[in-house]
Amino acid sequence: MSKNTICLWYNKDAEEAARFYADTFPDSKIGAIIRAPGKYPDGEEGDVLVVEFTVAGVPCIGLNGGPTFTHSEAFSFQINTENQEETDRYWNAIVGNGGQESECGWCKDKWGVSWQITPRILMEALAAGGEQAKRAFDAMMTMRKIDVAVIDAARKGGDAR
């Protein structure tokens, strides 16, 4: 186990979430599945208590802690993509598996975890600063899933719509 690990709280479906992440993102996998050695407030002895997993190289654990705490937009995974095909693949996997679209490249999976599906070209445009960044930012503000062609055109001073 890594010295620093992200812990995500789930009601009872940490294993299902971890398997979805491992199947969806490269450099992702399931590790140990730890079962409760005894009864606890939201579960029984033998229930899955903790799942160790990696999402795109980031070590995580999923804790089946019950319904007390839920996810919020204050935490998200940002997945950087190289092109529209990769952007579409991750976005569609999350939203198409019971998730929900949001604004500016953000979406939530069916467990309430927020994701930013962010094409590299958008981050490059924003990092460049100046008018290029403003045009790309203004274009992004009108989107749900990021449209790479529109960001590229805005970056260059045109409109791809």
Image (cartoon, rainbow, N blue to C red):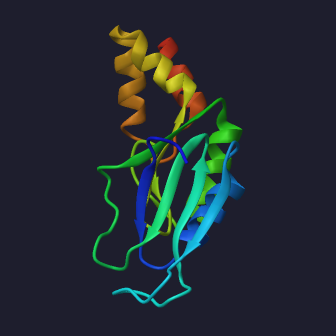
Image-based side of 39 in relation to 32, left or right: left
Q: Can residue 159 be seen in this snapshot?
A: no
Q: Is residue 93 above or below residue 79?
A: below
Q: Is residue 25 above or below residue 68?
A: above
Q: Is residue 48 above or below residue 61?
A: below
Instruction: Count up the numbered dots.
Output: 0
Look at the image and tell me in which quarter the C terminus lies: top right
Residue at 62% across, 57% down? 21
**Quadrant hosting residue 93:** bottom right
Residue at 63% across, 49% down? 90
User: Which residue occupies the foreground of this view, 22 or 81?
Assistant: 22
Residue at 32% across, 68% down? 70
Q: Can residue 110 be seen in this snapshot?
A: yes
Where residue 57 sits: x, y (%)? 61, 40
**Quadrant hosting residue 136:** top left
User: Which residue occupies the foreground of this view, 83 or 19?
Assistant: 19
Where residue 155 sits: x, y (%)? 48, 17
Residue at 44% across, 41% down? 4
**Quadrant hosting residue 72:** bottom left
Image-based side of 12 in relation to 149, left or right: left
Where residue 99 sits: x, y (%)? 51, 65
Where residue 126 sits: x, y (%)? 40, 19
Q: Is residue 18 above or below residue 140?
A: below
Residue lying at the far front of the rendered structure = 37
